[in-house]
Image (cartoon, rainbow, N blue to C red):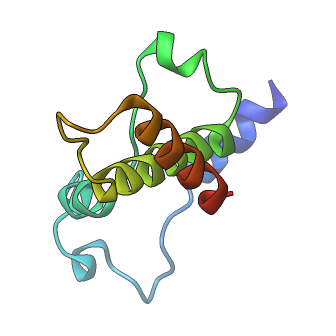
Amino acid sequence: MEDSMKKAEMVNDDLRPEYRREDFGALVRGKYAARLKESSNIVVLDPEIAEAFPNTKAVNDALRGLLELARVSARLPAPSVSTPPSALHAQNALFATTTD
């Protein structure tokens, strides 16, 4: 009860005499919402995806790993039809040792 009285007193607190409400211009709800939305990078994960990650660091680490894998995969030459499987295995083994 006492807290609600304090809040009521704060709500009724008027501006200082040297300030007038009209000096501040019109109030506009959500005035900066569009600007914030443009500069924001908040992503909402689907619930089943969010369950796989315990925290923000885990999500960021997984995404960094995925980006690195995509970069590396883009650099690997596509195997030709005549490349024997043993050569592909050797290439993958070499790749594994150079990225660690």
Answer with left or right where residue 87 lies relative to residue 90: left
Answer with left or right where residue 85 lies relative to residue 61: left
Residue most toward the bottom? 18
The mark tally for this picture is 0
In the image, residue 71 sits, relative to residue 51, either above or below, namely: below
Identify the residue at image location x=22%, y=64%.
35
Q: Is residue 16 visible?
A: yes
Out of 48 and 80, give the one closest to the viewer. 80
Answer with left or right where residue 39 lies relative to residue 42: left
Identify the residue at image location x=54%, y=21%.
50
Answer with left or right where residue 47 lies relative to residue 74: right
Query: Which corner quadrant holds the C terminus?
Result: bottom right
Residue 16 picture location, percent across and down: 51, 79
Residue 43 picture location, percent across and down: 39, 39
Residue most toward the top? 48
| Quadrant hosting residue 51 | top right
Residue 5 picture location, percent across and down: 72, 36
| Quadrant hosting residue 39 | bottom left
Out of 22 and 70, give the one closest to the viewer. 70
Out of 38 and 43, give the one closest to the viewer. 43
Identify the residue at image location x=83%, y=31%.
2
Identify the residue at image location x=59%, y=45%.
93
Residue 48 picture location, percent across and down: 49, 10
Out of 37 and 44, give the one closest to the viewer. 44
Query: Which corner quadrant holds the N terminus?
Result: top right
In the image, residue 39 sits, relative to residue 92, either above or below, namely: below
Q: Is residue 12 visible?
A: no
